[in-house]
Image (cartoon, rainbow, N blue to C red):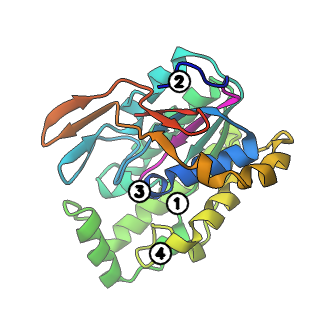
């Protein structure tokens, strides 16, 4: 890492699974367009990642969001303002967690973030898109993405509806922004954002954040997009298992070209 860099203007906290993993640099860039930068960035993500349980994707295993190192990093130093995006909610259902346990995990994450006065945006489950899946499509994609899952389409939808409604109630109680996802963003599997719509999708979500006037910087930052999207050092997971063997990496492990440091948990 460079010994000198600009003092961070804010802290960004990003939690998600496949969609966020595929669009991490884009999401960071769009958040900084709206909220300013450089930033201290804490991310917990990964294909198939869940909030409340350990997950295994092929040979790689990751802890649930509630048990990852992000929260220790969050407590280690105070940086304000803090902005948090929680997205890709729903994988826990296909790993067998009951809806109330999923909601408790999400509530725990939100409480931790509110303890740091974070401005929080949560994307709700894309329930309309999920319900549009035919039995054949549901089984096909379930077997690809969650081969150990035996839940029927109807049971999965029932659980998804409970989590969806639970998040609506939670947002009213805890006063965070809840973003309802329109089905037009998603592809044939009902959960992954269409590649060509990713930028517009995240721009729409990030409008939920109050930009405190920093959004006026957007045009200037847009001109530096290619520079800001460049990794000087790609982040590595703080903790993961590979074929059952534990791997650790000291954090922050990533750095963007604007000096933003990234902890990947």
Quadrant for the C terminus, please.
top left
| Residue 10 magenta-highlighted | yes
The reply, left or right, for residue 31 in relation to residue 25 is right
In space, the residues marked 2 and 4 are separated at their CA atoms by 36 Å
Q: Mark 1–mark 2 contact, CB under 8 Å? A: no
| Callout 2: SS | helix
Q: Quadrant of residue 128?
A: bottom right
Q: Secondary structure at mark 1?
A: loop
Q: For mark 3, what is the residue?
A: 18
User: Does label 1 or label 3 sit earlier along the sequence?
Assistant: 3
Q: Find the distance from the CA under tag 2 to the CA under tag 3.
A: 23 Å
> With respect to residue 159, does 65 lie above or below?
above
Marks 1 and 3, how far apart in space? Answer: 14 Å
Gap in angstroms between the C-alphas marked 3 and 4: 20 Å
Q: Which residue is mark 1?
A: 125
At numbered mark 4, what does the secondary structure look like: helix, strand or loop? Answer: helix
Picture coordinates of residue 125, whole percent (x, y): 52, 60
Q: Which residue is mark 2?
A: 74
Q: Does residue 194 show up? A: no
3D distance between C-alphas at marks 1 and 4: 11 Å
Give whichever of discs 1 and 2 has the lower sequence position.
2
> Which picture quadrant has residue 63?
top left
Residue beneath disc 4: 131
Counting residues from the start of the chain, the first of labels 3 and 4 encountered is 3
| Residue occupying the point 53% across, 18% down | 3
Above or below for 38 versus 127: above
Q: Which residues are magenta?
A: 8-17
Q: Circles 1 and 3: CB distance less than 8 Å?
A: no
Density class for disc 3 (Cα within 10 Å; few <14, some 14-19, many ≥20) is: some
């Amino acid at each position: 890492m460079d010994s000198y860099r600009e003092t961070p203007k804010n802290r960004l906290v990003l939690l998600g699974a496949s969609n966020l993993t595929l669009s991490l640099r884009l999401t960071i860039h769009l958040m900084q367009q709206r909220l300013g930068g450089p930033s201290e960035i804490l991310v917990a993500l990964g294909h198939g990642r869940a909030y409340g349980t350990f997950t295994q994707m092929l040979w790689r295993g990751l802890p649930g969001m509630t048990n990852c190192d992000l929260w220790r990093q969050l407590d280690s130093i105070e940086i304000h303002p803090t902005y948090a995006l929680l997205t890709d909610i729903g994988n826990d259902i296909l790993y067998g967690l009951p809806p109330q346990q999923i909601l408790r995990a999400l509530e725990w994450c939100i409480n931790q973030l509110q303890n740091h006065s974070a401005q929080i945006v949560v994307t709700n489950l894309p329930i309309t898109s999920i319900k549009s899946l035919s039995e054949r499509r549901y089984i096909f994609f379930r077997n690809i993405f969650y081969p150990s899952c035996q839940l029927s389409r109807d049971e999965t939808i029932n659980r998804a509806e409970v989590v969806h409604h639970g998040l609506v109630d939670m947002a009213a109680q805890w006063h965070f922004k809840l973003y309802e996802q329109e089905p037009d963003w998603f592809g044939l599997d009902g959960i992954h954002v269409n590649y060509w719509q990713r930028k517009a999708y995240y721009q729409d979500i990030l409008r939920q954040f109050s930009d405190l006037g920093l959004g006026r910087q957007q045009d200037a930052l847009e001109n530096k997009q290619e520079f800001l999207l460049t990794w000087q050092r790609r982040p590595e997971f703080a903790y993961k298992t590979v074929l059952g063997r534990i791997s650790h990496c000291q954090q922050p492990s990533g750095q963007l070209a604007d000096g933003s440091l990234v902890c990947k948990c």
